[in-house]
Structures are given as C-alpha cells and as structure tokens.
Image: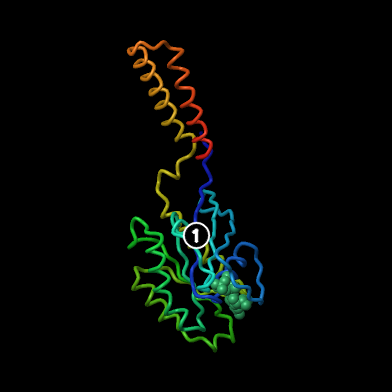
Amino acid sequence: MATRRRMLLKVIILGDSGVGKTSLMNQYVNSKFSNQYKATIGADFLTKEVQIDDRLFTLQIWDTAGQERFQSLGVAFYRGADCCVLVYDVNVTKSFEKLNNWREEFLIQASPSDPENFPFVVLGNKIDVDGGNSRTVSEKKAKAWCASKGNIPYFETSAKEGFNVEAAFECIARNAVKNEPEEDMQPCGVTWFYVLPTFVGIFLIRLMLGALEGNNVRQVVNARRYGARRFARLVGLIL
Ligand SMILES: Nc1nc2c(ncn2[C@@H]2O[C@H](COP(=O)(O)OP(=O)(O)OP(=O)(O)O)[C@@H](O)[C@H]2O)c(=O)[nH]1
Ligand SMILES: [Mg+2]
C-alpha cells in the first residue's frame, strides 16, 4: 500500500533551429556537449529519473526539430505535455522574436485545458559565446517578455559550459509536477482500494440479475469470465 507509482512527466522543447535544444537536453541528461551541429529530424526523447522533495519522477524530455522541413509532428505528440520549454539564442534576435510563434503553436496543437496557466519555461541559451560580446537580446528584454506572458520563469544558460542547465531543468520538472492532476499522484494501493470493491459489487449485482432472469449461477459466471479477462488486460495496460 505504501509504494507509489513513479510518475511520468512529459516535457517538450521548442525553438528555432540551432538555438541549442538538443545540446541542452544532452548536457542535462548525459552531461555531454558537442560543438558539431546535427539537425534533429522529427523528434527524439531522453528520460531522466528525478527526485522532487520526497517523490521520484521519470522526466521524459522531447526534443523537437527547429528546421521546418524536419517538423512532422502530429497533434498527438503535443498532447499530454506537462511543461513546454521555449529556447532562443541570446545572440540571435530572430530566435527571440519567434518565441511568441512557438508558444502559440504549442497552445494550438496541445490545446491544454487551461491555456492561460499552462507552464512554460524560457531559456536564453549560448550566453558563453564571445564572452557575452555578441549578445543581441538583453536579459531585461527577455524577462519583460516572460512577465507579459504570465510570469514565465526565465533562465540564461550555456549548454556548452553546463551553466544553469541543472537549475533550469529542476524548475521545468517542478512546473510539470504542478500541472499533473492530483489523482495521478495516488499510490497504486489506493487505486485498488476503490476499484476492487466496485468490480466485486458489479459482479454480485449481475449475479442477482441473472438469477432473476432465470439463468443459473454457472451461466452468469461463464458470461462474466470473458468480461473479467478483458478487464485484466485493461488493468495490465494501465499498470
Ligand atoms: N557556444 C555554444 N554553442 C552551443 C551551445 N548550445 C549549442 N551550441 C552549438 O550550437 C549548434 C546547434 O546546437 P543544437 O543543440 O544542435 O541546436 P538545436 O536547437 O537542437 O537545432 P535543431 O535540431 O536544428 O532544431 C551546435 O553546433 C552546438 O554545438 C551553447 O550553449 N554555447
Ligand atoms: Mg536539435
């Protein structure tokens, strides 16, 4: 009864091509960075086990293609996301200006139940480049945009140097947890506590109804066995 189901948190990373989405994910999950650019095709995901307060979660991080020709994601891909990460390059103004498009595209595709309060996190990446001298988007400007969109948390990162990457993903995970419905947090035992008596009750009622219709117990049990097999298969899928 005391064991909890490890919850899955789905995170989606969006942003222009080359801003460092794949590099950020690799730095966070594998502590690795490569200077070589290999465009992401379609989408790819990595998982990481994270502990938040006293609970364990599996963070499933979906890295998407920034290049339009490689974007082939259906609506189903966005559905069920618990947090969306918007990345731009602090040295490329256009990538910052596109944040609004990425945000809106996500809200259209994912159609979350409460779009106003859906958790986003913005990352301004590549702050290491040229010691900050080639920077074209100021921290102030980025923070002002985040504030105007409902106080989106903002982090300046360097996937290359690993700067702020851990802190950013901790915030991402925490926001994703907040977005999960409470009932999913329940331990398995509690779920069974409610489900089992319900099915036993339904079985007994059917047995009684069958008897009233003139069926004997064997006929009712045989009919129920098929239903029980289907139910067991369903439970197997859920667990
Ligand atoms: N200096 C520096 N270079 C970075 C940083 N992050 C990524 N890069 C480099 O930028 C290039 C693009 O990085 P990616 O992570 O592949 O970019 P992406 O956003 O995944 O690109 P797409 O897959 O096309 O959408 C690569 O050459 C990386 O090495 C960073 O923080 N600092
Ligand atoms: Mg990529």
Q: Which of 68 and 65 is in front in this view?
A: 68
Eyeballing the image, is 234 above or below 211? Answer: below
Q: Which of 76 and 49 is in front in this view?
A: 76
The residue at the point 38 percent across, 61 percent down is: 118
Q: Which amino acid does label 1 sit on?
A: Val
| Label 1 CB-ligand 1 distance < 8 A | no
Q: Where is residue 135 in the image (x, y as percent from the top left)?
A: 51, 86
Picture quarter with ligand 1: bottom right
Eyeballing the image, is 165 above or below 225? Answer: below
Q: Residue furthest bottom?
A: 133
Quadrant hosting residue 178 = bottom left
Asked whether residue 159 appears in the rendered view, the answer is no
Kindly state the secondary structure of the residue where label 1 is placed.
strand
Q: Where is residue 184 in the image (x, y as percent from the top left)?
A: 44, 45
Q: Where is residue 234 in the image (x, y as percent from the top left)?
A: 49, 36
The residue at the point 46 percent across, 17 percent down is: 221
Eyeballing the image, is 187 above or below 69? Answer: above
Q: Where is residue 125 in the image (x, y as percent from the top left)?
A: 53, 76
Q: Which of 172 and 69 is in front in this view?
A: 69
Q: Which residue matches tag 1?
A: 11
Q: Nearer the viewer, residue 9 or 45?
A: 45
How many numbered discs sit on the rendered protein? Answer: 1
The residue at the point 36 percent across, 19 percent down is: 205
Asked whether residue 129 appears in the rendered view, the answer is yes
Label 1 crowd (10 A; few <14 / some 14-19 / many >=20): many
Snapshot colouring: rainbow
